[in-house]
Image (cartoon, rainbow, N blue to C red):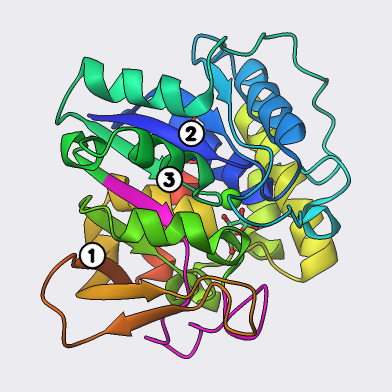
């Protein structure tokens, strides 16, 4: 069982990852913190609660975090994820109240309550995580590990940018935060575009039709989210569910152990994640290949079960 604190910016694929987690007995979500990324933070905070309420998981607290990156203004991705950030799905606005603390304070408290036991999952820009690490430099060492979706490492033909030709969205959005986190000493597993853009790990229309045959709340919501992506983007990229999958079955991936430099600032190379081969400190695990069909089988089996 993995005790998880999750920082997210839902976002269609964040929501798919959350549904996968709620359907997975290996994962216990202790709390969620929300960050500005795919949508403004009030919307990502509402979306996390919309999904939790719909799946009867209201007992998971949601604390709202940063409304913009450390040194930049927010450039959301609503044009990709739809005007509500969740592909215009039919979930009502949330009734659940936000947890009355700032995201980073809440995150710190949950880790302190179970030192060494909590895995931090981060599937949005790393702003909240950076605030928490800056406020409490001992925090990275108290985590079981940190699994994040972010980066494009040039390890496969898919490891190019999606926000710019060179940079991935989450890291590009807040490169200063990513720089802090990547140099924090946490035991990091980074899942980047090198694996999440592998077409063998994407849901297509045939998968969607299978999901539509199942009439459970989880399958109904997954079908709506995937339908939007397939309609507007041709297939459904599984960026954030793939990051969560590291906890469900680490053997789905190959990894390299490397030091990663994050390019800060606002130049053409903002948010670039560069592998530095010659360094032997601050090494992190970077996913370099995924068994896409086996991942999709796992995802669908969890979503399609009663
Ligand atoms: C990442 O950016 C966001 O749009 C997705 O939710 C994912 O976390 C992919 O680059
Ligand atoms: Ca995300």
Label 1 secondary element = strand
Residue 106 lies, in percent from the top left, at 43, 20
Q: Quadrant of residue 144?
A: top left
Which is in the foreground here, disc 2 or disc 1? 1
Q: Secondary structure at mark 2?
A: loop
Number of numbered discs visible in the structure rendering: 3
Quarter assignment of residue 15: top right
Give percent across and percent down for residue 6: 44, 34
Which is the main secondary structure of the residues drawn in magenta? loop
User: Residue furthest toward the bottom?
Assistant: 157
- Is residue 216 in view from this perspective? no
Q: Residues within 10 Å of mark 3 (few under 14, many from 20)?
A: many
Residue drawn at 47 percent across, 69 percent down: 151
- Kindly identify the residue that appears in the image at 24 percent across and 71 percent down: 255
Few, some or many residues within 10 Å of mark 2 (<14, 14–19, 20+)? few
Query: How busy is the neighbourhood of tag 1: few (under 14 within 10 Å), some, or many (20 plus)?
Result: many
Spatial separation of the CA atoms under disc 2 and disc 1: 34 Å
Instruction: Say which quadrant the N terminus sits in.
Output: top left
Q: Nearer the viewer, residue 129 or 118?
A: 129
Q: Sequence order check: which comes first, mark 3 or mark 2?
A: 3
Instruction: From the image, tell me which residue sits under label 3.
Output: 130
């Amino acid at each position: 069982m993995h005790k998880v604190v999750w920082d997210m910016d839902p976002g269609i694929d964040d929501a798919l990852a959350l549904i996968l987690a709620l359907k997975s007995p290996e994962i216990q979500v202790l709390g969620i913190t929300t960050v500005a990324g795919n949508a403004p933070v009030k919307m990502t905070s509402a979306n996390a609660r919309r999904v939790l309420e719909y799946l009867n998981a209201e007992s998971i607290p949601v604390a709202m975090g940063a409304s913009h990156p450390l040194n930049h203004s927010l450039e959301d991705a609503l044009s990709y994820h739809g005007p509500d950030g969740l592909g215009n799905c039919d979930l009502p606005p949330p009734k659940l109240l936000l947890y009355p603390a700032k995201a980073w304070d809440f995150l710190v408290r949950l880790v302190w309550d179970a030192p060494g036991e909590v895995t931090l999952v981060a599937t949005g820009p790393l702003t909240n995580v950076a605030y928490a690490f800056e406020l409490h430099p001992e925090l990275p060492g108290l985590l079981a590990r940190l699994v994040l979706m972010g980066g494009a490492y040039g390890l496969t033909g898919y490891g190019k940018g999606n926000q710019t030709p060179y940079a991935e969205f989450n890291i590009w959005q807040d490169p200063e935060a990513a720089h802090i986190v990547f140099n924090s000493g946490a035991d990091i597993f980074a899942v980047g575009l090198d694996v999440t853009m592998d077409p063998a790990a994407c849901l297509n229309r045939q998968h969607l039709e299978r999901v539509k045959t199942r009439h459970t709340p989880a399958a109904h919501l997954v079908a709506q989210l995937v339908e939007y992506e397939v309609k507007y983007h041709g297939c459904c990229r599984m960026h954030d569910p793939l990051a969560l999958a590291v906890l469900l079955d680490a053997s789905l991936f190959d990894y390299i152990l490397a030091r990663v430099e994050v390019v800060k600032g606002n130049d053409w190379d903002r948010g670039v994640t560069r592998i530095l081969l010659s360094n032997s400190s601050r090494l992190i695990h970077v996913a370099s290949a995924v068994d896409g069909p086996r991942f999709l089988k796992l995802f669908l089996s969890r979503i399609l079960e009663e």
